[in-house]
Amino acid sequence: MNNIRIGTLVGGNDAVRVLPQIIPYGFESFELTFWQTTGQADLPELAKQVKEIVAEKDIVISTLGIFGNPLTGTGDNGDTLASWERLIDHAEAFGAKLVTGFTGRMPGTIDESLSRFGEVFGELTKRAESRGVKLAFENCDMGGNWENGDWNIAHNPTAWELMFNAVQSDSIGLQWEPCHQMVSLIDPIPQLRKWAHTGKIFNVHGKDATIAWDVVREYGIHGPKPFVWHRTPGFGDTNWTDIITILRQAGYEGSIDIEGWHDPVYKDELEMTGQVHALNYLKRCRGGDFIPNPE
C-alpha cells in the first residue's frame, strides 16, 4: 500500500526541530519547503541531519520545494533562481528526486511570461536532468489570473500545455492538488483523469476545498462574501478515494503530501489534530493497512 505514500509539508529550516515530533503520528513522506530563498541554510548539513532522523524508518523525503518568483529575480525573489539551482544540486543528499515550486511570472499575461519561462526552466531542466532530478510546478494561482499576477503561471490547464510546449522534457511536470482548481470553480476529478495519464503529475499536495455554491448562485464570485475555503483533506468537498483510484489507474507511485496551515477551522491549536485526521483519512482512502493475499 506504500506505493502511494501519505506525508506532509515541513519548513526546511524547521525540519530538524519538527520531524522528530511528528514522525510518530505515522507520516510516510515529507516535503521540505523554503519560501523565496534557501537563505543561509547549510543544505549538506541539513541533509545529513534529516537523514539521521529518518534513518531505519520507512520514510522518504519526497521533494524539496522553493516557492518564489524565479523569473523576475527582483526584491525578495532575488535569490529564488539560485535557490532552485541549490536544491537541484543537493537533492540527492536528501534522497529526493524532485524539486518543486512556482514557475514565477513576468508582468502581464501568462502568454507574456512563456518566453522567460522557457529560458529559465530550459536551463534548470538541463541541470536537473544531469543530476537525475525532476522539476514540478504547484498549481496555485497566488491571487493571479490569466491577465495578471506576481507568482505563478502554472494554475490553469491551458497554461500547462503552453509550458510543456515551451520546455519539452519528461523531467518537468506538475505538483497537483484539487484545491487550487476548485478555487477557480474547475472540477478536479475529470481534470485529474485526463492529466494523470499524461505522466506529468509528479507529486500531489494533500489540500482540498469547500465551495459554498449557495453563495456563488446568490452573490457570484466577485462580491463581498467568501465562496470557497481551502481545507485539510477529510474536511472538504473532494472524494479522495476517487483521486487515489485515478492515480493508481495511471500508475502513479509518488506521494500525497498534506499541505496544512490553511484550514479555517482546524488551525492554531487544532492544526496537527486536522493534519493527523487527514493522514488517517487518506490512508483509509488508499485502502487501509496492506493485507497479503493467501498463498
Image (cartoon, helix red, strand yellow):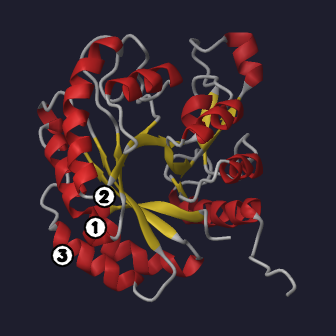
Rounded to the nearest angstrom, the CA distance separating label 2 from label 1 is 8 Å
Under mark 3, the amino acid is Glu
Q: Nearer the viewer, mark 2 or mark 1?
A: 2
Among numbered discs 3 and 1, the one appearing first in the sequence: 3
Among numbered discs 2 and 3, the one appearing first in the sequence: 3
Image quadrant of residue 90?
bottom left
Whole-percent x, y for residue 103 in the image: 32, 33
Q: Which quadrant is the N terminus positioned in?
A: bottom right
Name the mark on residue 132. 2
Whether residue 211 sits left or right of residue 264 in the image: it is right
Whether residue 41 sits left or right of residue 277 in the image: it is left
Which residue is rendered at x = 53% and y = 64% of the image? Answer: 7
Q: Nearer the viewer, residue 72 or 200?
A: 200
Q: Nearer the viewer, mark 3 or mark 1?
A: 1
Q: Nearer the viewer, residue 98 or 75?
A: 98
Among numbered discs 2 and 1, the one appearing first in the sequence: 1
Rounded to the nearest angstrom, the CA distance separating label 2 from label 3 is 21 Å
Residue 130, compared with residue 219, is above or below; it is below
Mark 2 touching mark 3, by CB under 8 A? no
Whether residue 185 sits left or right of residue 85 in the image: it is right
**Label 3 crowding class (10 Å Cα cut-off): few <14, some 14-19, many 20+?**
few
Callout 1: helix, strand or loop?
helix
Task: Inspect this view and state whether residue 200 appears.
Answer: yes
**Label 2 crowding class (10 Å Cα cut-off): few <14, some 14-19, many 20+?**
some
Name the mark on residue 102. none
**Tag 1 residue:** 92
Whole-percent x, y for residue 201 in the image: 52, 44
Under mark 1, the amino acid is Glu
Which residue is rendered at x = 48% and y = 76% of the image? Answer: 59
Whether residue 154 sits left or right of residue 45 in the image: it is right
**Tag 3 residue:** 45
Under mark 2, the amino acid is Gly
